[in-house]
């Protein structure tokens, strides 16, 4: 695997402060912070003690950083060729080689942090991180691009469950809901760039569907995740569970119908359903194992 060069970012005129800022921007900080915070919150609701919650958060943070940096470093040539301004490696605020070093360093740190949470917990978490790296390096441009997202998102709640005292095996419904959320996240993440990706020859699963069909499909795995989170745990769903499922289906249907005319409404509806799923996941945290 070669490392693309970006002389501008490696030049002496770029200060260390600018490079540090560029490196921070290259890790996809929004998703990194969101996923890490969500997993720490899930660890708290699942019953992990404070020290284990910190360890879980550190392992997830290292894994997410490695994936974000790998993504930007590997895509550098294509992003530079396409002139995608706003990315640090394109703007020249950080060198591609430096981003690769950061990615491998974070990955190396992720290994002991993951196994410190337990053998099975570490193996599950590293399987998810490996799937994300496989997406960045190869599967992004194939019909199997959805699979790493499904594996990666399913592994996160499983990792948390395996870190609970007694290390119980994660409940089937939390793993299934995580996988469905991952597929929905993949569609939502790729959707705005489908046309540009096709122009660059990237033909992952959403790109093969095309923007219109991908937009219509976007809410399906998210509503399915709602159903699993409501109906999967033992005991009756309760009126709030049924209400959440009904509202998710209603919002998704309205977004799909209106999205044919106003694309942003369909995306907003999918984000709303995803937010409801995350809330349900946290509320169900005590039963994930």
Image: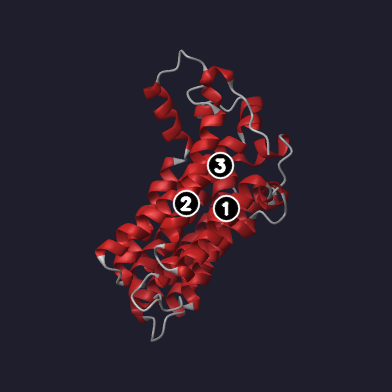
Name which quarter of the figure residue 114 lies in: bottom left
User: Which residue, as the protein is rendered here, is positioned at the far top?
Assistant: 13
Q: Is residue 12 above or below residue 100?
A: above
Q: Tell me which residue sits at (49%, 49%) in the image.
A: 108
Q: Is disc 1 placed on a helix, strand or loop?
A: helix
Q: Are marks 2 and 1 in contact (CB under 8 Å)?
A: yes
Q: Tell me which residue sits at (37%, 23%) in the image.
A: 17
Residue underneath mark 3: 70
**Foreground: 71 or 111?**
111
Q: Tell me which residue sits at (52%, 21%) in the image.
A: 9
**Which quadrant, please, contains the C terminus?**
bottom left
Residue underneath mark 2: 63
Which numbered dot is residue 175? none
Q: CA distance from mark 2 to mark 1?
A: 9 Å
Q: Is residue 191 above or below residue 77?
A: below
Q: Are marks 1 and 3 in contact (CB under 8 Å)?
A: yes
Indicate the position of residue 171 as horizontal and vertical percent values. 46, 78
**Foreground: 136 or 266?**
136
Q: Tell me which residue sits at (40%, 29%) in the image.
A: 20
Residue 156 lies left or right of residue 202; in this view the side is left
**Foreground: 136 or 255?**
136
Q: CA distance from mark 3 to mark 2?
A: 11 Å
């Amino acid at each position: 695997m070669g490392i693309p060069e970006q002389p501008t970012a490696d030049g002496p005129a770029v200060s260390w402060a600018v490079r540090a800022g560029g490196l921070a921007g290259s890790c996809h900080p929004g998703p990194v912070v969101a996923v890490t915070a969500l997993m720490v919150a899930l660890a708290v609701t699942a019953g992990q003690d404070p020290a284990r919650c910190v360890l879980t958060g550190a392992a997830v943070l290292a894994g997410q950083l490695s994936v974000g940096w790998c993504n930007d470093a590997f895509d550098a040539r294509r992003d530079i060729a396409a002139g995608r301004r706003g990315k640090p490696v394109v703007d020249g605020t950080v060198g591609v080689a430096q981003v690769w070093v950061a990615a491998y360093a974070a990955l190396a740190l992720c290994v002991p942090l993951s196994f410190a949470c337990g053998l099975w917990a570490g193996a599950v978490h590293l399987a998810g991180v490996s799937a994300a790296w496989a997406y960045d390096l190869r599967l992004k441009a194939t019909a199997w691009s959805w699979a790493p997202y499904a594996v990666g998102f399913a592994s996160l709640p499983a990792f948390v469950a395996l870190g609970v005292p007694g290390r119980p095996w994660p409940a089937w419904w939390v793993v299934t809901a995580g996988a469905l959320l991952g597929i929905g996240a993949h569609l939502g993440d790729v959707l705005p760039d489908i046309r540009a990706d096709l122009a660059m020859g990237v033909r992952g699963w959403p790109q093969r569907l095309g923007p219109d069909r991908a937009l219509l499909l976007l809410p399906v795995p998210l509503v399915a995740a709602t159903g699993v989170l409501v109906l999967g745990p033992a005991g009756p769903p309760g009126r709030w569970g049924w209400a959440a499922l009904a509202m998710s289906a209603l919002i998704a249907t309205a977004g799909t119908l209106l999205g044919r005319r106003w694309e942003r409404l369909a995306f907003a509806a999918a984000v709303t359903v995803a937010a409801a799923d995350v809330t349900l996941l946290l509320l169900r945290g005590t039963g994930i194992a």
